[in-house]
Amino acid sequence: MRERISSVVKTLKPYFDSLLREDDETGHLYLLDDELGGRASCCTQGEVACFHILDWTLNGGTGRETAARLIEDVARRQLPQGAFAQPYYVKKGAEGTIDIAEIGAVADGLYHVFRATGNEAARVSLAKAADYLLTQVAAEHPGAVYKNPSAKGHDVLNGDMYAAHTWGRAWELTGRDEYLRRAEAVFEHLADRFGKHSPGWWPYTENWDGSVGMGNSVAYQGTIVGFAHTVVPLLPDALRERWGKVARDAVDTMLEAMERGPDDENEAPWWCRDWGNAWEIYLAFSRFPDHAAARARLDERLREIEEKLRTDGLDVFRPRVKTDDPERTPVTTTFRKAATFAGIVSYMVLDDLVPPVRP
């Protein structure tokens, strides 16, 4: 896997390099999202920063310096309360919305940039984001977290894991025990909710009365399993063992569903039906190297991306799910898809190479 990822990194790096910009007034280094016509979101920029750490790890070069500068800009643009704004699917001209997925998806990037460079901006940014998440713990359940300030009427289960993942990484770099306690509460909650409505599934959302708000999702199930991985070694023995069984069952369910393709029963969120570009799925599969079917799916998709990057270039990341509302920005862009891929393949490799910190 690592050799194929190294090849993909070499192919993709010139694209990200072409989007590097320096602010004329301040000299700050940032990334351009050319489809949006402005600076990349903090999340996508942080993911690409981690990709530079991956490139430096696998291929040498100056990736550490580039990553540190990009993260310094992320930290400068972080909202005062610690969240990250996201510019996708918002009314044109409006401020970016807040969603904890923007934190969870980049938390590992902040962690690895700090571990590789020692740049304090990465550690401070991660801790600020973790503190913000503490303010979003749901009043209805201590193991749930509001996905955004406007979505308090239900529980978005993958959002809970984004928070737990962030807290786990922040605990490693700060030693603040509340982070780990909150992460454990999320794991207990998600283990309790697994299979409550359909065997082998978490729904995308539950209402607070326990009923389904929106149904099953291969992509978001992959998010839960994939981002849980870094916290699992930090859990108490009994919870770690329980989670191992839940996660493996979840992966089995995902593999069975993928034989059929996305439909209303296995991918209720319409915006996630482009499974080829939902790299959270393959992150989950990478967490089970001893699972033959999961490993085969991951290897197949990595081979495809390696070949298609050579033949089709960046079109391989072009979104297949379109947004029809002309009053809103796109729900995603080619750059966003490429940056998400870059972050996730970085996590696949670096999470296994870099041992956890135990404060």
Image (cartoon, rainbow, N blue to C red):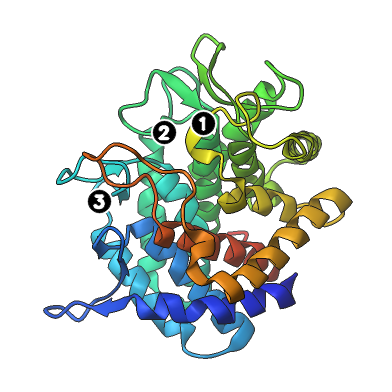
Q: Please name whichever residue, 239 or 270, is drawn nearer the observer in this view of the structure.
A: 270
| Amino acid type of the residue that numbered disc 3 sits on in the rendered structure | Leu
* Residue 37, x across and y down, in percent: 24, 62
**Which residue is label 1 attached to?**
269
Residue visible at 41% across and 62% down? 335
In the picture of the structure, the residue carrying the numbered disc 2 is 147
Residue name at image x 35 percent, y 52 percent: 128
In the depicted structure, whether residue 339 falls above or below residue 205? below
Marks 3 and 1 sit apart, C-alpha to C-alpha, by 28 Å
Badge 2: few (under 14), some or many (20 or more) residues near its Cα, within 10 Å? many
Looking at the image, residue 268 lies above or below residue 288 = above
Numbered tag placed on residue 49 in the rendering: none
Q: Local crowd at mark 3 within 10 Å, few (<14), some, or many (≥20)?
A: some
Q: Residue furthest top?
A: 209
Separation of residues labelled 2 and 1 (CA atoms): 15 Å
- Categorize mark 1 by other alpha carbons within 10 Å: few (<14), some (14-19), many (20+): many
User: Is 90 in front, or is 161?
Assistant: 90
Instruction: Kindly identify which residue carries mark 3.
Output: 79
Q: Position of residue 64 (x, y in %)?
A: 47, 82
Query: Is 84 positioned to the left or the right of 235 in the image?
Result: left
Assign a secondary structure to mark 3. Answer: loop
